[in-house]
Image: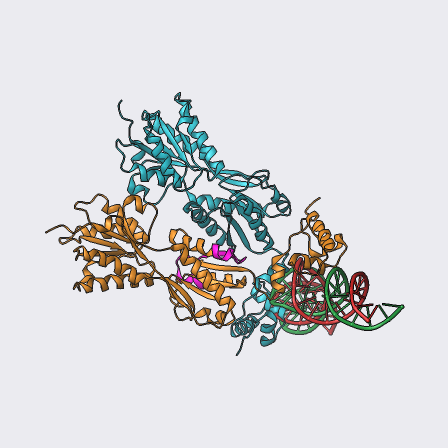
Chain colours: A orange, B cyan, C green, D red
DNA sequence: ACACGATAAGACAGCGCTGACATTCGTGCT
DNA sequence: AGCACGAATGTCAGCGCTGTCTTATCGTGT
């Protein structure tokens, strides 16, 4: 036996002595097949190692596959992956599979990647927008492909979306610091995600203004270079003549950097990070946490709902955050 | 305009005044189309928002899609998603997309999930084996679908594989401890992955035997319950009458648990974890590290190679590990 | 014994695309 | 002028499957 090719419906039908339509019925689960025939068909199928071809099935059924695409910026960020896990789980429950693609956080590749995915006729498109214009997706949306924007709203496109309660979450964090008496509060972040950064920064300013601090700009450090620079930013802030007594981080990357610097600082500086992370508990780091998987699950659910009812109102959902007290955020400012 | 349906090759052809074959040629990139015609076709396509249907293309081309499946046990483990990131990256370079599926670490669901994936006619199957028998994949492999086993070898199936240098890595870690004079070295792990556990445990025993320690069983703690129990296991070990002076962890989950317990132990207990993790540097944790993304990239490369040359020898690759000294593993045993 | 509806099974076309082959036409060469 | 040849384009069938419609078969009530 050389390269025996894959068995098809017709092959199974021939072996079982029935028509291919009958075999189809057996595998599609549709009724009107006698138990005896079904057995015979299944037997033949097994003998030939038959496996229905979903490509053909999808094509015949109107050209739509049973996969859902999730387009992600950077796969190495644990945040995205937890979101992906949530999506996968929710989809699997509906018999859909998730295909994952990366834009490497470069706006230009977004449309290319999305295009390739749409060519595969994904049922729905879940997307963490990177480019600053998603209007190119409008045609597709009108053609009935649900487009769900995750973690950031889409720009120039009417799409369902799920985002975090960024502003609220950060404001809560800062308020808990001001309540302890902190007024000089540094804000560190890298700008990877402009939208979330802006929101969180907004929450930070809002909370500080509530206690009368208006010159927040001098405490804000948003740097371009990804991983490393958060450390540098924190060091810069602390090495000033008038250093902050507390620091908040805009995302998990910045938190990691900040933690590295703050661990052995004296006097201790209060710290709250945005995004929970592994071992934050062991390190006693206070963070603004939220259910990352839930973000993914919600996104998937939105897609399923839109699939079920294309004419429904566009939905904009928000995943709540909560402040998780672990010590680092409860440090009081030094008595000057 | 109600639910305008999706444009097909034929629609574009009609509008451009050419045959559908010509349109096909334009989109398939094949030559022999005059520049003028190409322009006209592209114009019409754009007007109609045409997007080639990859399903149909794949079907026509022999029923194989351009997706590769990666079947994973548990998406929330950072280890797996770094692997996935590596795979995605390598595949994207070849124009393939990755579909991701989860078995939730339950052996029974493995075949079900894999079956669904194969029905989608994935080009290749990358798999972290969970069940203890992959012989069910043999037919598929003979039909030409590359099956690559990742992180653990497949059982009862001839398949290419990439694994870590588990035994060697763990032995190195233990040797570095014995070199400092440690003899009472605890081993903690949860058994999620029997294969890697066995290998690492083997390396541990091997290194201890080299210095004459043979009764290792009393220092070994492998517990069934996932996350939590590692902490308990470490506590149990330390609370004994004759506690170990050093501990090694069998995987990242166990490390996290161990770190939580060991942080505020006096006298300090030496510790080395298997698998690097975020902030391990900040915490000063010595680990057996390796390039996780490379594991994924290698797996993807194996798939591509097998696709290119189905008759090549089966390959079994190993990703090297290296001991990353950060302090926790360099603590000397107390002078009794 | 007969009509009639329910059930099981088959025939056929076609989803959107491309491979194989056919056709047309302009060009350069003898 | 006649011919070969390559480039540009077209025709047609069919990848594997299923929706629609048709046909065969059977049991039931009168």
Residue B122 visible here: no
Does the magenta run of residues contain A93? Answer: yes
Instruction: Provide residue D23's location: percent of width, then percent of height.
Output: 80, 67
* Residue B19 spot, x, y in % from top left: 63, 72
Q: Quadrant of residue B158?
A: top right
What residue is shown at x 26% (from left), y 64% (from top)? A202
Q: Percent x, y for residue C7?
A: 73, 62
Residue B111 appearing in the image: yes
Q: Is residue A175 above or below residue B188?
A: below
Question: Which residue, as the protein is rendered here, is positioned at the far top?
Answer: B212
Q: On the rendered image, what quadrant is the C terminus of chain B found in?
A: top left
Q: Residue at x 53, y 45 (%)?
A: B127
The span picked out in magenta is A89-111
Where residue B203 sits, quadrant-wise, is top left
Q: Is residue B129 left or right of residue B85?
A: right
Q: Nearer the viewer, residue B81 or B321?
A: B81
Q: Is residue B217 left or right of residue B336?
A: right
Work out whether residue B234 or residue B144 is closer to the camera in this orientation and state it.
Answer: B234
Q: Residue furthest left?
A: A336
In the rendered structure, the answer to whether residue B76 lies left or right of residue B11 reads left
x and y, in percent, of residue D13 in the image: 72, 64
- Asked if A296 appears above or below B221 in the picture, the reply is below
Q: Is residue A287 above or below residue A129?
A: above
Q: How many marks?
A: 0
**Left or right: A10, with B99 as reference point:** right
Front in this rendered view, residue B294 or A68: A68
């Amino acid at each position: 036996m050389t390269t025996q090719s894959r068995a098809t419906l017709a092959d199974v039908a021939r072996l079982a002595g029935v028509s291919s339509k009958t075999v189809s019925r057996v595998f599609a689960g549709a009724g009107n097949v006698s138990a005896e025939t079904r057995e015979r068909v299944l037997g033949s199928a097994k003998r030939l190692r038959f496996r229905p071809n979903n490509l053909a099935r999808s094509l015949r059924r109107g050209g739509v596959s049973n996969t859902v695409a999730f387009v992600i910026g950077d796969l190495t960020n644990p945040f995205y992956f937890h979101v992906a896990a949530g999506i996968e789980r929710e989809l699997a429950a509906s018999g859909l599979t998730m295909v994952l693609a990366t834009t490497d956080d470069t706006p230009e590749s977004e449309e290319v990647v999305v295009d390739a995915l749409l060519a595969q006729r994904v049922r729905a498109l879940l997307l963490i927008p990177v480019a600053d214009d998603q209007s190119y997706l409008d045609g597709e949306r009108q053609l009935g492909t649900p487009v769900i924007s995750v973690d950031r709203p889409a720009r120039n496109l009417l799409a369902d979306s799920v985002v975090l309660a960024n502003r609220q979450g950060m404001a809560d964090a800062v308020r808990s610091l001001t309540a302890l008496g902190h007024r000089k509060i540094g804000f560190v972040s890298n700008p990877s995600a402009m939208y979330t950064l802006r929101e969180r920064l907004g929450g930070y300013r809002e909370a500080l203004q509530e206690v009368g601090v208006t010159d927040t700009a001098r405490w804000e450090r948003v740097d371009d270079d990804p991983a490393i620079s958060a450390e540098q930013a924190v060091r810069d802030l602390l090495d000033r003549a008038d250093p902050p007594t507390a620091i908040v981080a805009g995302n998990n990357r910045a938190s990691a950097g900040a933690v590295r610097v703050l661990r052995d600082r004296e006097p201790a500086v209060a710290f709250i990070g945005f995004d929970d992370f592994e071992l934050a508990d062991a390190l006693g780091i206070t963070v603004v946490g939220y259910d990352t998987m839930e973000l993914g699950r919600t996104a998937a659910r939105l897609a399923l709902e839109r699939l079920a009812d294309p004419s429904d109102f566009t939905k904009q959902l928000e995943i709540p955050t909560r402040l998780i007290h672990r010590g680092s955020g409860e440090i009081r400012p030094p008595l000057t």
